[in-house]
């Protein structure tokens, strides 16, 4: 598939409505099995959108506590034909992954959040075409800096984090946007990169809200149009 | 929490709109970590909605190929305080989990699918209140027979399968409905129970469509109102 259709494929489909049925072609999100081999040991097979796979692998290893920084990465080779990513790292004793409190003092206006969400929803190409993927973004108060799509909401955020790690993009004082629901795992991912604000189009879980409270993270949900719910650390939202 | 609020919790939230801000209480979906200990070995920790946990555990073990039937189950004890499920099974040599083709000859009218979807969407209590969960159901052509909700779309289907296994509910010639996107893993779960039709409110992935085609499963997506897309084995949809 060419550049334009990355992450999507055309399939025959029977469309049924009250008026009758018709054979058409429909665009469907690609689902790609990618096996990660870390230091010659098979680690996991991720089901993902086959775009920016290096970022996904690095972000996943970081989120799982298996990679601390770009300096610990010796090599990464993604074989898209075989669906295999081989990663070599400098082995270190397993880290004590105690979540730390985010102290960043960034403050945002509601209108800044609303504008970012509008831009975010315009960016999501594969979703608009297939309805089958999640999106995530890293932003400052004005702009989307990094954007990713994936059939998995965790993968979309790992792609963002992986791109930040590989390209030395700072995440302190920045904002994560996600199309997906916010569960505890999403909170822990953001915390590991010291990200103080998470904004979601969808709902959070109660455990995510309690974690956000404990970790000093501002958690925003149901950010749609000119409305949002702030579940924790609302002092970062300016009047 | 009482019966009425199972799977949900009340939390304080700051609601921000163009008109201003107000402190309210909002209902949020519960997220519960449940650790499964199988034959005295810790297996996995699922993040889930703490309702029908026995069904979830049995369905999960079945989907993972770790439990074949109710006859192989010696005991299950769920400790909700500790978030632990202990399961004892009759150990068997690991099964060759080759997916088999579903041959069931059930045929359905589009109107039957539309009516089931309407009923399905009315049933989803936690979703209507929190916006934060997925639902799944097992149906025949006329009625919803088993219904489950969970913050995870895989969990919701595993709860359905677990209930069918524990209560000897047949699944041949029946239909699964899911609120979530249909990925390859969902197809494999249905196939293990010989279920010939999967209907989703959302999109499928390309891999799910190809698997459905190979496995003889009728895969329907975007079933909303009086419309649906049939991606495979449309011979089961009567004119």
Image (cartoon, coloured by chain):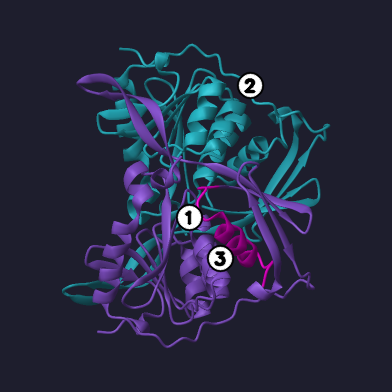
Chain colours: A purple, B cyan
**Residue B44: percent from left, percent from top:** 69, 52
- The verdict on residue A194 being magenta is no
Q: Identify the residue under disc 1.
A: A153
Q: Is residue A223 visible?
A: no
Which span is picked out in magenta? A48-69
The C terminus of chain B appears in which quarter of the rendering?
top left
User: Mark 1 vs mark 3: same chain?
Assistant: yes
| Residue wearing tag 3 | A162
Kindly state the secondary structure of the residue where label 2 is placed.
loop
Describe residue A179's horizontal placement relative to residue A207 as left or right: left
| Residue A98 image position (x, y, % from top left) | 65, 76
Q: Secondary structure at mark 1?
A: helix
Number of numbered discs: 3
| Quarter residue A16 falls in | top left
Q: Chain of mark 2?
A: B
Specify whether B158 is left or right of B9: right
Q: Local crowd at mark 3 within 10 Å, few (<14), some, or many (≥20)?
A: many
Q: Residue at x 36, y 80 (%)?
A: A234
């Amino acid at each position: 598939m060419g550049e334009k259709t990355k992450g999507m494929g055309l399939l025959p489909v029977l469309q049924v409505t009250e008026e009758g049925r018709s054979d058409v072609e429909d665009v469907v999100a690609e689902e790609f099995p990618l096996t990660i081999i870390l230091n010659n040991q098979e680690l996991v097979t991720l089901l993902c959108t086959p775009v920016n796979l290096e970022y996904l692998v690095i972000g996943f290893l970081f989120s799982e506590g298996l990679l601390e920084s770009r300096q610990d990465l010796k090599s990464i080779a993604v074989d898209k034909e075989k669906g295999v990513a081989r990663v070599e790292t400098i082995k270190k004793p397993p880290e004590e992954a105690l979540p730390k409190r985010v102290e960043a003092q960034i403050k945002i206006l509601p209108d800044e959040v609303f504008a970012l969400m509008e831009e975010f929803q315009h960016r999501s190409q594969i979703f608009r075409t297939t309805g089958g993927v999640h999106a995530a973004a890293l932003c400052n108060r004005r702009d989307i800096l990094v954007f990713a799509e994936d059939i998995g909401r965790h993968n979309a955020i790992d792609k963002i984090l992986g791109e930040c790690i590989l390209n030395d993009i700072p995440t302190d004082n920045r904002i994560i946007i996600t199309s997906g629901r916010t569960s505890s795992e999403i909170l822990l991912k953001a915390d590991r990169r010291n990200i103080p604000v998470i904004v979601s189009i969808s709902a959070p879980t109660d455990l995510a809200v309690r974690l956000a409270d404990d970790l000093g993270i501002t958690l925003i949900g149901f950010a749609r149009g000119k409305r949002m719910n702030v579940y924790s650390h609302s002092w970062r939202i300016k009047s």
